[in-house]
Amino acid sequence: MSGAGTPLSGIGMTSDRTRLRMVEALRRDGITDERVLGAMLEIPRHHFVEEGIASRAYEDVALPIGHGQTISSPTIVAHMTQLLFEGQPAKVLEIGTGCGYQTAILARLAKEVYTVERIAALMDKARRHLRDLRFYNIRYKHADGHAGYADGGPYDGILMAASATHVPEALKQQLAVGGRMVLPVGTEDQWLYVVDRKESGFVEQKRDAVRFVPLLPGLA
Ligand code: SAH
């Protein structure tokens, strides 16, 4: 699927090699889930950023995607996806579609993905890119992710790509029993949280220090 038929296919050769190097670096960094590494080897990350910065797409950095937002670094995408897929979720909700790269990784690994974005222009662009790459198992919603995406729930997995001040209650309610949510929480200091919903209730783990854009209210 390496960018075939896309306007960026001209740099396909280079990106295949640099993508392999990115995946080798992730492996050295402790990403062990072969499904995650395989998906990241397959999905052309450069397809999701503007042509002017496409040559930097495989560096381990967050890059601008417009509207003051950033595509998360490969390390954070891999780390969050690995945490989410420990439980083999079939139906996943993503909050913060952004450029759609993380969406593609999720859609490669799960049966169905529901994704919510508050900035219409980003959502439209992500939808176009994901259609070009022939992903048909994704549902999109232009909405405030604080409320989740009730129509598709409950979800086996929920991943949020923007930092909330607290774990949003609606998302907890849309998480299936046995499901897992991975999200950043905090404003100045942010931490990655893993929230598991068990028969007996919610179990929260505070993991690594992270840096995300804020989860903002309302639509744009
Ligand atoms: N996974 C994305 C991350 C983009 S940054 C990527 O790799 O491109 C986080 C995204 O969350 C931004 O696109 C931002 O607009 C979106 N966002 C912020 N607050 C939101 C909210 N309340 N509901 C939905 N999306 C939100």
Image: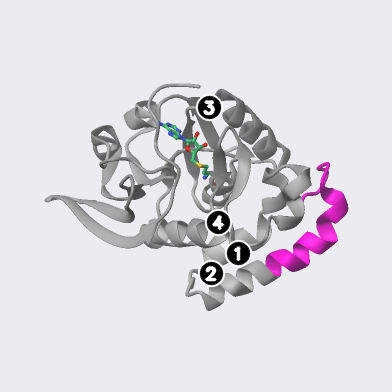
The magenta region covers 1-20
Counting other residues with Cα less than 10 Å from the Cα at mark 2, is it few (<14), some (14-19), or many (20 or more)?
few
Q: Position of residue 80 (x, y in %)?
A: 43, 57
Q: At label 1, which amino acid type do we have? A: Gly
Q: Which residue is mark 1?
A: 38
Do residues under tags 1 and 2 come within 8 Å of each other at their CB atoms? Answer: yes
Q: Which residue is mark 2?
A: 34
Q: At label 4, which amino acid type do we have? A: Ser
Q: Which mark is residue 17?
A: none
Q: Which mark is residue 119?
A: 3
Magenta stretch: residue 5 in it?
yes
Q: Earlier in the sequence, mark 4 or mark 2?
A: 2
Mark-to-mark CA distance, 1 and 3: 30 Å
Mark-to-mark CA distance, 3 and 2: 33 Å
Mark-to-mark CA distance, 1 and 2: 6 Å
Magenta stretch: residue 43 in it?
no
Rendered residue at 56%/59% (across/down): 74
Counting other residues with Cα less than 10 Å from the Cα at mark 1, is it few (<14), some (14-19), or many (20 or more)?
some
Residue farthest to the left, as pictured: 200
